[in-house]
Image (cartoon, grey):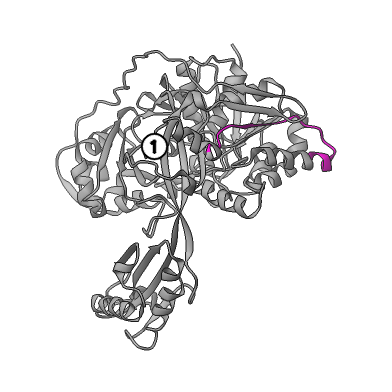
Amino acid sequence: MTEPIRIANCSGFYGDRLSAAAEMVDGGPIDVLTGDWLAELTMLILARTRAKHPRGGYARTFVSQMEQVMGSCLDRGIKVVSNAGGLDPSSCAEALSEVADRLGLAPTIAYVEGDDLLPRLGELVEAGIDLAHFETGEPVGDVSRFISANAYLGCWGIVDALERGADIVVTGRVTDAAVVCGPAAWHHGWGRDDWDALAGAVVAGHVIECGTQATGGNYSFFTEVPGLVRPGFPWAEVAADGSSVIGKHDGAGGQVSIGTVTSQLLYEIGSPAYLGPDVTARFDTIELSEPAPDRVRISGTRGEPPPRTLKVAMNELGGFRNDMTIALTGLDIEAKAELVEAGFWAACPFGPDDLASVTTSLVRTDSPDPATNEEAVALWRLSVKDPDERKVGRAVSNAVIELALANIPGFFAIGGGPAPGRPYGVYRPAVVPADLVPQHVVVLGSDRTVVDSVAPGGVVDVLAAPGPDAPVPTGDTRRAPIGRVVGARSGDKGGNANLGVFARSDEAWAWLDAFLTTERLRTLLPETADLVVERHRLPALRSLNFVIVGLLQEGVAASTRQDGQAKSLGEWLRARVVEVPASLLD
């Protein structure tokens, strides 16, 4: 049996800590360096970058990181696997080759492509492939409007590149977990139907994909985490059976605990059957333990065959938008909001019916008897969208500024002055048959191979782990924020939001499971009242996961919510005051 492989993360998003690669390479022993650069929003950003700078649709920060560590990685036999290739993995690979030449190094560099379906959309539609929105069923319509369309590839192109001797592997849009699953499958020699092993590696990849979110970042109980001023990045030591140990380098800030790992397991998921191109990982079979400080063992994960389709993330330019915020200070806040809104429409050359979308909101950030000027301020927020930039550009911002001396007392705007409208993107998910999207693997200076994206079929019976068996606490209750008892982690899933809630004791889980129904969640978070809310149980993790359909409208870039990525949704829930069993608070 092969020894475990230690796979380290050095990026959770495009723009993450630039020094993280060097920290992970120099801070302790690792076998593979990887990270995630590609959020759904990032693909839109890279598409706009590529439109201005051809062959520039990749994450340049990754190239900068590799300039810092390429020599050390080659000396120590550390493989590098990255999805930083974005929309142009070949150009990213060439940029790495230029860095290597400049440093006098000779790594074997490979890239994986085939995910970019934008040039093929027309032929796919003509061939009868239904690219309808996979949640709403809306027909795809004219495909010429899209600026990016990328299938989520799996890990086997990465495996092929490593088998062919690659030191550095750059991919386009693969799943976030594939950059961990690929090296693990290569190292251990897994087959395509080793469902449980693959599922375990996917879970490990999901935990470390967002970097320091596994070591205490964005953690509800952050006051318990030491060194959070500068948390270290995580690694996953994946064993031959797919089980793993999550850890961090000794001496690095932050903490790896059952709490931090549970929190990250709940991030941006849907049902417990976590679909992927290589395996369906059953999150309701995961078991966690703490064998040592800052070490969490993940075991028991079961896997099932994946769907015969691949998810496709498409982005189109939705038009233009403008967002303005006016401060409302002191007394008569609601009357001031009404006057600002009426004054704005009186000054604007376009009425609300002339615009594609108008959203206004009154945000009560003010306090009674305010001790500071800032505590006296509430906000009136305006968001407008339209295909015609002239309608939402300076026509809107000028109308707001005209009110400065002619409207409410204490008028001032939050943000800049008159500005043109900003283009925004609309995210659209679809699926495509996996057999139509092979992976192309190119080793620089060598030939190209083609890797099939179709996984084996079959049926696997999987039972969810039962979780703890504890009675629901009874007796006296006290009014307290629910977050005194439970933690949460939330985020975006396209136009939907996910909200994971977890307990840290068996008794607290029994209460949470009984208390936090879908109906109760709607009451605590009124903004969800008119939306479809899915509730999923993960008893072995003492957790619930809610999917709030449509909360983020047409996706992060188009959302008019103050928090367009739903990152704060969980902390809002934790702040709500409810009747909590006194025994849990004590």
Instruction: Tell me which residue sits at (25%, 50%) in the image.
Output: 528
Task: Left or right? Give the position of 17 relative to 132.
Answer: right
The 10 Å Cα crowd at callout 1, few under 14, some 14 to 19, many 20 or more, is: many
The answer to if 108 sits in the magenta stretch is: yes
The answer to if 252 sits in the magenta stretch is: no
**Residue range corresponding to the magenta coloring:** 100-117
Q: Position of residue 332 (x, y in %)?
A: 24, 79
Task: Left or right? Give the position of 573 relative to 16.
Answer: left
Q: Which residue is mark 1?
A: 269
From this viewpoint, which residue is outermost toward the right?
Answer: 104
Quarter where residue 335 is shown: bottom left
In the rendered image, which quarter contains the N terminus?
top right
> Looking at the image, can residue 517 be seen?
yes
- Find numbered disc 1 in the image and state the secondary structure of the residue it sits on: loop
Quarter where residue 361 is shown: bottom left
Which amino acid type corresponds to the residue marked 1 in the rendered image? Ile
Nearer-the-camera pick, 583 or 388: 388
Nearer-the-camera pick, 457 or 497: 457
Q: Position of residue 68 (x, y in %)?
A: 74, 44
